[in-house]
Every structure is written in structure tokens, then in C-alpha cells.
Amino acid sequence: MSARGAYAPHNGNPPAPYPAEPGAPYSGAPNAPYDAPRPPAADRKGVGADRLALIIHGLADIAAIFLGLWILLYLLDANQANPFVDFVHGMADWLAGWSQDIFIMDTKGLRVFFNCGLPAVIYLVVGHGVAAWLRRL
């Protein structure tokens, strides 16, 4: 057996995870990703900000989905007694509570569209903007 180990890199086999002979130099690369050295702390400083940005981005998307789904269910005249429709309506009312009756129109469908559509757009713009700002940190 050579000093390079049983699985020498030159023969196409993977490198040995440890020296083949006692005292022989380590011949293989680390078993990535488990044995790979961690980057210095300076290179990992944005990891927390990236995770927070992902959470904010996802919450803004979920809020907009609930509001858009309620608009769709209302305009398609979904059964308001259905538990799913009631849940979506409750979530939309909670998410858009601050914007109710900004637009007062005779047609209830347009009123729901604009009073829920405006917060959906604001959640998307603000949520994605904050997430982009956090990713730059």
C-alpha cells in the first residue's frame, strides 16, 4: 500500500477519508459537506438577515394570497356558510381591517375588490421591499 492510501485520487476512486498507514499524510479531500471547514464568522454575518428576509417575504406573500383568495371567492359568489370560505373571509377581514371602507362604492363587488386589493398590493410591496433591504445587510 502506498503512502497515498488505498483510494488514491489518481486512479478515479474517491479519496480516503483517513490516512491508510499510521503516520502517512492525509491524502484526500474532506468528506463534503460534513467535514468541510466552516467559513469564518465574517463570511456568515448575513445568514440571520437572509432568514429574516425570507420569513418577511413569505408572510407578505401569504397575506396577499389570503386577500386575493377572498376577492376571488366573493366575486365567484362562494357559499358563505362553508367553513373554508368563512375562514378565508375571517383572515381577509383581519388582514385588511385597517383599510375597510377606504373606497365606498355602490357595487359591493368593486368595494371588496378595492378594499382588499389595496392591502394585498401594499403587503407585497412593503414585504418584498423590507426583505430586499434586509438581504443587502
Image (spheres, grey):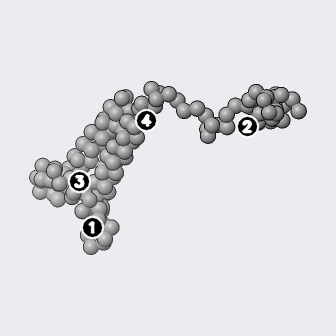
Estimate the spatial distance between the alpha carbons at disc 1 and disc 4, rounded to whole Å. 39 Å
Q: In what quadrant of the picture does the N terminus appear?
A: top right
What is the number of the mark on residue 47? 4
In this rendering, the count of numbered labels is: 4
**Which residue corresponds to the image point at 84% horizontal and 35% vertical from the top-left?**
6
Mark positioned earlier in the residue sequence (1 or 2): 2
**Around disc 3, counting alpha carbons within 10 Å, would you say few (fewer than 14), some (14 to 19), or many (20 or more)?**
some
Q: Amino acid at mark 4?
A: Val
**Which residue corresponds to the image point at 20% horizontal and 50% vertical from the top-left?**
114
What is the number of the mark on residue 86? 1
Mark positioned earlier in the residue sequence (1 or 4): 4
Estimate the spatial distance between the alpha carbons at disc 1 and disc 3, rounded to whole Å. 14 Å
**Around disc 2, counting alpha carbons within 10 Å, would you say few (fewer than 14), some (14 to 19), or many (20 or more)?**
some
Q: In what quadrant of the picture does the C terminus appear?
A: top left
**Around disc 1, counting alpha carbons within 10 Å, would you say few (fewer than 14), some (14 to 19), or many (20 or more)?**
some
Mark positioned earlier in the residue sequence (1 or 3): 1
| Nearest-to-viewer mark from 1 and 2 | 2
Q: Amino acid at mark 3?
A: Leu
Could you tell me if the residues under marks 4 and 3 are in contact, i.e. CB atoms within 8 Å?
no
Estimate the spatial distance between the alpha carbons at disc 1 and disc 2, rounded to whole Å. 59 Å
Mark positioned earlier in the residue sequence (2 or 4): 2
Q: Residue furthest front?
A: 23
| Nearest-to-viewer mark from 4 and 3 | 4
* Residue at image mark 3: 95
| Nearest-to-viewer mark from 2 and 4 | 2
Q: Amino acid at mark 2?
A: Pro
Estimate the spatial distance between the alpha carbons at disc 2 and disc 3, rounded to whole Å. 55 Å
Q: Secondary structure at mark 1?
A: helix
* Residue at image mark 2: 17
Query: Residue 90: where, in percent of width, then height?
Result: 24, 62
Q: Amino acid at mark 1?
A: Asp
Quarter location, residue 53: top left
